[in-house]
Image (cartoon, rainbow, N blue to C red):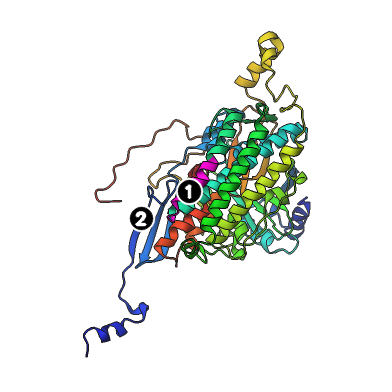
Amino acid sequence: MAKIVLDRLTERFTDGEILETGSQHGNEWARVSPPAWRQVAEFLRDDAAAQMNMFVDLTCVDRTPREPRFDVVLHLYSIEKRYRVRLLAGVSEKDPAIDTLVPVWLGANWFEREAFDMYGVRFSGHPDLRRILMYQEFQGHPLRKDYPKEKRQPLLRRPPGSV
Amino acid sequence: MVFGESDISDFDNEGDLPTETMPLMMGPSHPAMHGTVRIALEVEGEKIKTADIQIGYLHRCFEKEAEYATWTQIFPYTDRLNYVSPMLNNVGYAIAVEKLLDIEGKIPERAQYIRVIVGEISRITDHLTCLAAGAMELGAFTVFFYLIKGREWLWELLEEVSGARLTHSYVRIGGVVADLPEGWPAKLREVLAKVRVALGDADKLLTRNKIFRDRMDGVGVIAKADAAGWGLTGPVARSTGLAYDVRKDHPYLVYDRFDFDVPVGSTGDNFDRYAVRLEEIFQSMRILDQALATIPAGPTIIDDPRVALPKKRDTYNTIEAMIAHFKLIMDGLHVPTGEIYSFTEGGNGELGFYIVSDGTGRPVKCRLRPPCFANLAVLTKVLPGLFIADVVPTFGMINMIGGECDR
C-alpha cells in the first residue's frame, strides 16, 4: 500500500542513499545509507505525496555477526494518506553513531534515548542523550546480544548527601 | 506614608521579584503518582520552569526475556505490560505473530469475536482505572469507588474466562485457549448495565462539578499540530482533535463489522482527555452489545498442528499428538524468517509489536512500541508554565502505566 512512498524515495534519491527497498507481510521498508538518514526522514515528512507526519517508533536490532552489526529501525505513519513505512540504517559496532531525528519529529527524543540506553548507538546532535530506562551508572548495553541475561551489575555506593 | 505601601507597588510586577528556582522531586513514590515515576521539577514559586520525567523504575527486561522465551511463553510477559488491560496486549502480540506465520486470515471467527469482546472489556477497565484514579487524585473519592467497583465486576468476568484476575494469558497464537463459559454472555450484559449506572453517577458527580472543571479545563493543553510529531496516539491524541484510531483506520479482527464512533476533543486539555475516555467506554459497550448479538458458533483455535496444541484427549491417547504436544512445548512453534510491525489499538493508543524472527523457536527481537511512552514524553513540553498542582491532573489524564512505559 505504501509502495508509492518507496517509489517517491527511489525517485528522489538516486545517488545511492536508498540501498534497498522491499515489502513483507504488508510492511514496506527501505534501507537507507546512514549519512542520508536525516535527509531522507525530512524528505518523507515534507513530501506532499508521502506526508509522513507521525513518528511511530524507533529502535535498534542487533544482527550479530553481520556487519554493520546494528540496524536503527524507524517506523513512520502518515495520518492523511494512511501510509506506513519502515526505514532501516546499519551502523557499525566500532562507531555506532547516526544523526538524530529530534529536529524532524520531537517524539524521537525519548525513543533515541532508549536505543542509546539499550544498544549503545549514539545519536549525534541529540539534545539530551542520557540513559532512560537504566540508571546512569549502569555498565554496558543490555539488549546487545553479547550482554548475558544473568549478568550482575556492580553495587553502587551513592555519595553521601546525594538524592 | 503608610508602611509597606510603596513596597507593594514596587513589587507589583511579578517579574521584578527576586526569585530563585527550586528543585522539587515528585516521586518516585508519591501519592498522586499512580505508578513509580519521578518528575524532577524546577519551580519558581508555584510555577514550573522545567520538568524532567525520569522513568525506568518498573523496567523488567521484557525484550531481553522475550529473546530467550518460546513464542507462546511470551504471553505471560505481555500480560504484565499494560497491566490494567492485559487482554489487549495478549491480542496485539498474537496478531503480530500470526501475521509472521501468514495464518492471519485463518483464525476462526468465533475466536476473533472473543478477542474483540475480551479486548473491549479490557479497554473499559483501562479507562475506568484512569478516570477513577484521576478523580481520586483531585479529591473525588466517591467516584473512585463507583468506578473501581465497576472495574472489579468486569475483572471477575475475565477471571471466569481465563482463570486469573489480571494476568490472563488467555489468548494463544491461532485463537484463544478456551471458549467462553456457559451463561457468560448473560452475565456480561448484566454487568455492563451496572457499569452504565456507575458511569452515570460518576458523570453526574464530575462533568459539571466546578472544582473538577477548574482543575481540568484549559490545563495541560496539547495542540493538534504537535500530536503526530510527538507520536501521540489513543485518547491523548484524540483529545487534541486528531481522529486516529487503529480500529477505524486499519481495522483488524472483525472491527469493521461493528458500528461505533471515535470521539475526539477540541482543545486537547485534561478535560477533553477525561471526556474522550468517558465516551470511549460507552462506545466499547456498543461494540460489546453488537459482538454478543452476532458471535457465531464454532472452534476457538485454528486447526493447524504446527501452531495449536492438540486436544488433551488426543495427547494422552495417541503417540502422534503426544509428540506434537512435546515439540510445541519444548521447541516452541517455528515462525518463518521475517520482520513485522503489527499494531492494534491498546488502552493508551497504538500498541505496536516489532518482531524479528530468524526461523527458530525464539524471536531475535520482540519489541513493544509502548503508546504511553510517547504520550508521557510530551509532558516535558506541556508541564513547564503550569502550576505544581496542575501536575497531578495532567499526569493522571496521560494515564502512564509503568509496566507498559518501562517494560
The amino acid type, in three-letter code, at marker 2 is Met
Mark-to-mark CA distance, 1 and 2: 26 Å
Q: Which mark is residue B180?
A: none
Name the residue located 58 percent from the left edge and 31 percent from the top edge.
B169
Number of residues whose C-alpha sits closer than 10 Å to that of mark 1, classed few (under 14), some (14–19) or many (20 or more): many
Image x and y of residue B238, in percent:
62, 57
Residue B148 is covered by the magenta coloring: yes
Chain-order first, disc 1 or disc 2: 2
Q: Nearer the viewer, residue A57 or B21?
A: B21
From where the camera sits, is residue B308 visible? yes
Q: Is residue B284 above or below residue B298?
A: below
Please report, as a chain letter, where disc 2 is located: B
Asked whether the residues under the numbered discs 1 and 2 touch, taking CB atoms below 8 Å apart as contact, a structural biologist would say no
Name the residue located 64 percent from the left edge and 62 percent from the top edge.
B241
The amino acid type, in three-letter code, at marker 1 is Phe
Name the residue located 58 percent from the left edge and 41 percent from the top edge.
B367
Q: Nearer the viewer, residue A124 or B323?
A: B323
Q: Which residue is mark 2?
A: B25
Q: Secondary structure at mark 1?
A: helix
Which residue occupies the extreme bottom position in the image? B1
Q: Is residue A25 above or below residue A127?
A: above
Which stretch did the figure color magenta?
B138-151
Residue B301: image quadrant is top right
Q: Which residue is mark 1?
A: B144
Q: Is residue B297 above or below residue B88?
A: above
Image x and y of residue B46, in percent:
37, 66
**Which SS does the magenta portion mostly show?**
helix
From where the camera sits, is residue B353 visible? no
